[in-house]
Amino acid sequence: MKPRSITALFPAYNDADVIGDLVRVALEALSQVTHDYEVVVVNDGSTDRTASVLDELVERHPMRVRAIHHPRNLGYGRALRTGFAHARKEWVFYTDGDGQYDPWEMLDLVAALQPEVDVVNGYKTVRCDPLHRIVVGWLYSRFARLAFGIRLRDVDCDFRLIRRALLQQVELQSDNGAVCVEMIRKFQDVGGRFVEVPVSHYHRAFGSSQFFRPHGLCRVALQLARLWFGFFLSARPAPAARLHLDLRRHA
């Protein structure tokens, strides 16, 4: 299945050293898939040169690149929500603006598309992070699967291709990293159909994660608690997803 059009979305916060290269790689990858594509970057109140780098990219590629600037840092979830609201194409691909994923592997997600699939979700074959982040990430993913009934193996792998029509069926509320759990659970609730493919994960060369700081983890924990009560006190069971495939490849 070949998508008619794709929006590639990058939430960015203090990613001036890498975001330009990520956008250029995404433009090249998208050109291999369709003639109808765009790149949207949400600058979430960065205090470095991210805004000027993005403005230069927009000036250089006015028909392909759009930048949305938050006046202050509003959080990862809010940046994603802003990007989803501005996406115009049939499919929305998103990954982080910190360079830990290779946008070129978007082609692997596209290759897994089938007419009955709504979400192609990446999962990390090897997590290239410090040990404490690997442990916290594993515990977080395990908790999400057990507490929220998430069926994906890697809910915090921010490398996804989503049918925009599915995004329009759900209303996201999280402003922080809890947005991924909320999004996947709500996709399941409306009968979203998933396929999973392995993707590469790289060491972060610049900047630092906002998620793994103590105050960031506390905010995510509070948001997850609110989400849990919202999902399970409503007494609405999650229906079985209509399709869940697991495509595996070996490098």
Image (spheres, helix red, strand yellow):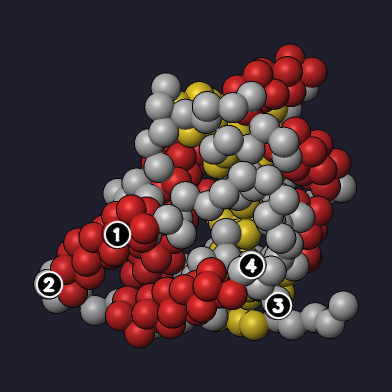
Going from N to C along the chain, the mark reached first, 2 or 1, is: 1
> Given the image, on which type of amino acid does mark 1 rest?
Cys
Task: Give the side of residue 174 with respect to residue 183, left or right.
Answer: left
Q: Disc 4 or disc 3, which is closer to the eye?
A: 4
Q: Position of residue 103 (x, y in %)?
A: 75, 51
| Residue to which mark 3 is pinned | 125
User: What is the C-alpha distance between the residues marked 2 and 4?
Assistant: 36 Å
> Given the image, on which type of amino acid does mark 4 rest?
Asp
User: What is the C-alpha distance between the residues marked 2 and 3?
Assistant: 35 Å
Q: Are marks 1 and 3 in contact (CB under 8 Å)?
A: no
Q: Disc 2 or disc 3, which is closer to the eye?
A: 3
Q: Residue furthest top?
A: 59
Q: Quadrant of residue 199?
A: bottom right
Establish if 55 lies above or below 138: above
| Residue to which mark 2 is pinned | 233
User: What is the C-alpha distance between the residues marked 4 and 1?
Assistant: 20 Å
Q: Residue at x 69, y 69 (%)?
A: 128
Q: Disc 2 or disc 4, which is closer to the eye?
A: 4
Establish if 111 lies above or below 213: below
> Given the image, on which type of amino acid does mark 3 rest?
Thr
- The tag on residue 129 is 4
Q: Position of residue 64 (x, y in %)?
A: 73, 27
User: What is the C-alpha distance between the residues marked 1 and 3?
Assistant: 28 Å
Q: Residue at x 38, y 76 (%)?
A: 144
Q: Position of residue 249 (x, y in %)?
A: 80, 81
Residue 187 in view of the camera: no
Q: What secondary structure is found at the residue carrying circle 2?
A: loop
> Given the image, on which type of amino acid does mark 2 rest?
Leu
| Residue to which mark 1 is pinned | 218
User: What is the C-alpha distance between the residues marked 4 and 3?
Assistant: 12 Å
Task: Give the side of residue 10 with respect to residue 180, left or right.
Answer: right
